[in-house]
Amino acid sequence: MSGGTPLEILTPLATAARQAGLSVGSLVLPLPERPLPSGRRLPRLAAPEQDERTAAIALATQGLLAAAGVESRYVVLDFGPVTLTTGFAAIARAFARRQLGEDEPGEALWAAAVGERRARAAALSDACLWALEALVRIAEPVGATLVLPIGATPWEVPSPRESRALLDTFVGAAVGAAWDPGKLSVLCELGLSISDGRLAALGETAALVLDNDAVGITPGYLPGLGERDPRIAAIRPPAAIPRVVLGGPTATAAEVAVAVAKAG
């Protein structure tokens, strides 16, 4: 179950899946209890304000308990967007116009976004840690593994470095990282640093593969309908790691079938 799906449909969805010989193996949390009204958004696990983080943890806890009831083993945590002075849309426009390079119109915007994100790294990491400490106590007794996404842009959290620090803190706990080739390709496209050794280790030890491609700096395309950075494409996570095939709402049933067959 992906982000934004209301929790109220989890049980009926799981029932229908079982009748078809399937299951809801993973979900993204937090999810709203019911469809959000227009103009409302979910509270963020990595919000600067403690009240908002507390509300997000409460929703994620509700989702964890519901996931246990339908035997969903993997929970991908969505820490929420990072709000920066420079918006992602401005960078996306500059990228599309090939204006992010040195002495290009988008260079200063990009430098400002990266600089602001670095300045807030400690506070964002503390917020992620605060949320994880609360949620891991719920996840372990119900047999769920919390999966950390890898932020591909300055507007996402945790970054590869922040993710590694969190994993080091929770060694031995029910916490792992996602191998997300779409997002990692975006990270490489934007020139954000991650070493070959870190990529190899992430591909080898990931708790879950979120199998998708990217187009430019937009991830989330079905495998085969987009592209992967050569560094990412060269890494093949072990077949034993569970896989979730991701694709946008415009993907056809035939395209989904092909992508799933290739992933299998």
Image: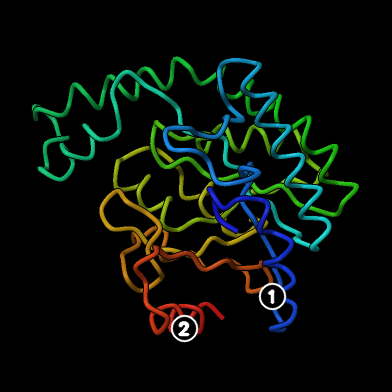
CA–CA distance between discs 2 and 1? 17 Å
Residue 193 occupies which quadrant of the picture?
A: top left
- Residue corresponding to mark 2: 257
Residue at 67% x, 33% y is 166
Q: Quick one: label 1, few (<14), some, or many (20+) residues within 10 Å?
A: few
Give the residue type that dot 1 points to. Ala
Vertically, is 230 above or below 157? below
Residue at 31% x, 23% y is 113
Q: Quick one: label 2, few (<14), some, or many (20+) residues within 10 Å?
A: few
Q: Which of the colour schemes (rainbow, by chain, secondary structure, one colour) is used?
A: rainbow
Residue 256 located left or right of residue 123: left
Q: Quick one: label 2 or label 1, which is nearer the N terminus?
A: 1
Q: Where is residue 255 drawn, in percent x and y?
A: 38, 80
Identify the element where label 1 is drawn: helix
Residue at 57% x, 41% y is 78
Residue 209 located left or right of residue 153: right
- Residue corresponding to mark 1: 17
The N terminus sits in image quarter:
bottom right
Give the residue type that dot 2 points to. Ala
Q: Where is residue 173 drawn, in percent x and y?
A: 82, 43
| Frontmost residue, 73 versus 242 | 73
Identify the element where label 2 is drawn: helix
The C terminus sits in image quarter:
bottom right
Residue 93 occupies which quadrant of the picture?
A: top left
